[in-house]
Amino acid sequence: MPSVLVVGGGIAGLWTAVRAAEAGCTVELVTKTELAEGSTRYAQGGIAAALFPDDSAERHYADTIAAGAGLADPEVVRVLCEEGPARVRDLIRFGVGFDRDESGLERGLEAAHSRARIVHAGGDATGAAIEAALVATVRRRSVAVHERTMLLDLLVEGGAVVGAVLLGADGTIVERRADRVVLATGGAGQLYLHTTNPGVATGDGVAAAARAGAELADLEFVQFHPTALAVPGTPLISEAVRGEGAVLRDASGRRFLAEAHPLAELAPRDVVARAVWRTMAGQAGAPVLLDATALGGKALARRFPGLDRIVRDAGFDWSRDPIPVTPAAHYAMGGIVVDLDARTTLPNLFAVGECARTGVHGANRLASNSLLEAAVFAERAARALVATPAPELPDFHESRASRDLSPDLPDVRESRASRDLSPDLPDFRESRASRGGGRAMDRGALRALMWDAAGLERSAAGLEAAASVLASWRAPEVRDRPSAEDRNLLELARRTVAAALARTASVGAHFRTDSVTAQIPSAPFEEAA
Ligand code: SIN
């Protein structure tokens, strides 16, 4: 059985690690911080699947295709929707206690779903419940977990991935060999000034894959969530709140979404986010208001206990008053190109979860499809890892690094790589010249630049100006985790801006103010239902 190195400790990485270990693989999982820290645990809304008698995989398929603004890959969407219910049942077996009412599983409605099909746990703590159950499952399997260990680069030999270069908890850089590497490193919300993502979301896997030569796609499709609380840190206010009946109002108290889409507050996320953005522009940047007062204090506290705490800690009583909300970067629809079994374009390299570009979301992801995507394609990855024949590379299985990994290794072991970089290793000690000349990059400036030029609305002029500023910045020398993250953010910012420049027409989450016609306009939602 192949040895497998999984990078990332969210739902996609944990799932793959569990299943690969069950299949008999030797599995190591590395994660940049603690296992539980990552976007999964912050997922509030829930997980969408056709589990109920009034629903079907066909309806879920139609909703996903319609939300994707014409660019979702039908074959991938079919796999997602058909295999989704079985993966939710797997989660129940893993120990996730989805919320129940007298009729069975409790379910919610979210934007652009034609049926209430979102199951949740702990009200708004679905991601945390999934993460906890999978972490407990990983701990029970023979998976060697190395926390505070960051991916720096992939090791490529003869065109195939043979392992990774890691930065360990003690700051040592080591080379780790494995027959398969699975990237499950999540998104890159930290590219943007305002994001719902945690600080770890710096696109490490996507940037490393790019440097190794893997194909990327759709980086221009960044999903902005319409309702982050307009306070520092912009915490997410779940779409499920609108699903329960909350409405959006402008500063004068007027509802404005019906003008943007017949489904008003429950229109696809890109439509709602843009309408919020424009309304804010029309009121000198002041946040719009999410009015959940009709739900009542008791219902808000019962259904959204985590949010109730967040909102009250920020000083608002949302049972009495509308709360200020703003869009924030939330999810990357693009990333590392993969096939239906999570294989990237590089042999032995797999990608699952948000870092992967399956094509399932097209230009705009349907709410609560992300946890489902992670589960469905991690399961398929785990099967393919075993099925994919090991490449016939000289000393591929024989290297010292792959032979003598003890299960209780210090998270990373100082290897030849850290003392004496061979010419084969990725050059993370590039010279100043190879990192680009000019000024050292500054993360805050990069995030502000991306927000202004590659945010909810883009134009050629703004993107070109951003591209030239980004080109003028020098990538940092990799010394520690922050500098490694900065290098990745700069890499992805440049690529995102280039992708946004290349797509000259507006579609889904990518909106060009200078495009004359929208490319493949969203199908009316009713048609799909
Ligand atoms: C939300 O709860 O609104 C976010 C869920 C998602 O991004 O799918």
Image (cartoon, rainbow, N blue to C red):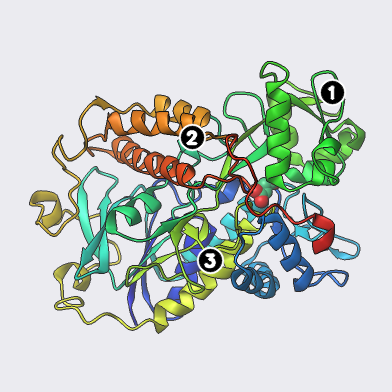
Residue 198 placement, left or right of 410: right
Disc 2 crowd rating (10 Å Cα; few below 14, some 14-19, many 20+) is: some
Q: Is residue 410 visible?
A: no
Seen in the picture, residue 390 relative to 376 is either above or below; the reply is below
Type of amino acid under label 3:
Thr
Mark 2 residue element: helix
Residue 410 placement, left or right of 194: left
Disc 1 crowd rating (10 Å Cα; few below 14, some 14-19, many 20+) is: some
What is the quadrant of the C terminus in the image? bottom right
CA gap between label 2 and label 3 equals: 48 Å
Disc 3 vs disc 1: which is toward the camera?
1
Disc 1 vs disc 2: which is toward the camera?
2
| Residue matched to label 1 | 321
Residue 177 found in image quarter: bottom left
**Percent position (x, y) of residue 165?**
24, 55
Question: For residue 460, which numbered disc appears in the image?
Answer: 2
**Percent position (x, y) of residue 9?**
46, 55
Type of amino acid under label 2:
Ala
**Percent position (x, y) of residue 419?**
9, 50
Type of amino acid under label 1:
Asp
Disc 3 crowd rating (10 Å Cα; few below 14, some 14-19, many 20+) is: some
Comes first in the chain, label 3 or label 1: 3
Question: For residue 137, which numbered disc appears in the image?
Answer: 3
Residue at (50, 60) in percent of width and height: 357
Residue 445 placement, left or right of 3: right
Q: Residue pushed farthest front?
A: 516
**Percent position (x, y) of residue 274?**
68, 36
Task: Confirm or reject: label 1 Cβ below 8 Å from ligand 1.
Answer: no
Looking at the image, which is closer to me, 408 or 433? Answer: 433
What is the quadrant of the N terminus in the image? bottom left
